Image (cartoon, helix red, strand yellow):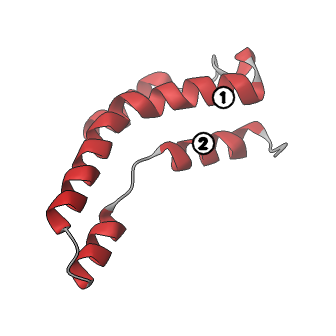
Amino acid sequence: LAMPAPMGLTLLVVTSSPGGSYSNWWCSMFNADLALSVTMTAISTLLSTFMLPLNLYLYSKWSYGGDILGVLDWTGLFVALAIV
């Protein structure tokens, strides 16, 4: 998309983050399998602690080259993931 690095990396973090609480609400509204939806949300949230940094590493290296990887605050990313 030829975005500047800060905007592109922000978009990568947002799109690599897990979601699912909205789908849980929809399942509850339409009497779908809420237990399955909550389970899938929990699993995707747990997997995101490893997959988000991996996705960010791979996609930023592919999109912006290796020079952007040294600028990223990896410690801050892992601390934020641990807090969440």
Q: Position of residue 81 (x, y in %)?
A: 34, 36
Q: Is residue 27 left or right of residue 51?
A: left
Q: Position of residue 64 (x, y in %)?
A: 76, 27
Q: Please tell me in which quadrant of the rendered image residue 52 appears.
A: top left
Numbered mark located on residue 12 in the image: 2
Residue at image mark 1: 60
Inspect this view and state whether residue 55 appears.
Answer: yes
In this view, which residue lies farthest toward the front?
32
Q: Residue at x 31, y 77 (%)?
A: 26
Q: Is residue 38 left or right of residue 45?
A: left
For this rendering, which residue is in front, 46 or 77?
Answer: 46
In this view, which residue lies farthest toward the left?
35
The mark nearer the N terminus, 2 or 1, is: 2
Identify the secondary structure beneath mark 2: helix
Identify the secondary structure beneath mark 1: helix
Q: Is residue 57 left or right of residue 28?
A: right
Q: Is residue 14 placed above or below 55 in the rendered structure?
A: below
In this view, which residue lies farthest toward the right?
2
Q: Residues within 10 Å of mark 1 (few under 14, many from 20)?
A: many
Q: Is residue 25 placed above or below 84 in the rendered structure?
A: below
For this rendering, which residue is in front, 69 or 73?
Answer: 69
Q: Residue at x 28, y 53 (%)?
A: 41
Q: Position of residue 29 (x, y in %)?
A: 25, 84
Q: Is residue 22 placed above or below 15 in the rendered structure?
A: below
Q: Position of residue 42 (x, y in %)?
A: 23, 48
Q: How many marks?
A: 2
Q: Residue at x 25, y 43 (%)?
A: 43
Q: As shown in the figure, which amino acid type bears the numbered disc 2?
A: Leu
Q: As shown in the figure, which amino acid type bears the numbered disc 1?
A: Ser
Q: Quadrant of the C terminus?
A: top left
Inspect this view and state whether residue 84 appears.
Answer: no
Find out whether the residues at labels 2 and 1 contact each other: C-beta distance under 8 Å: yes
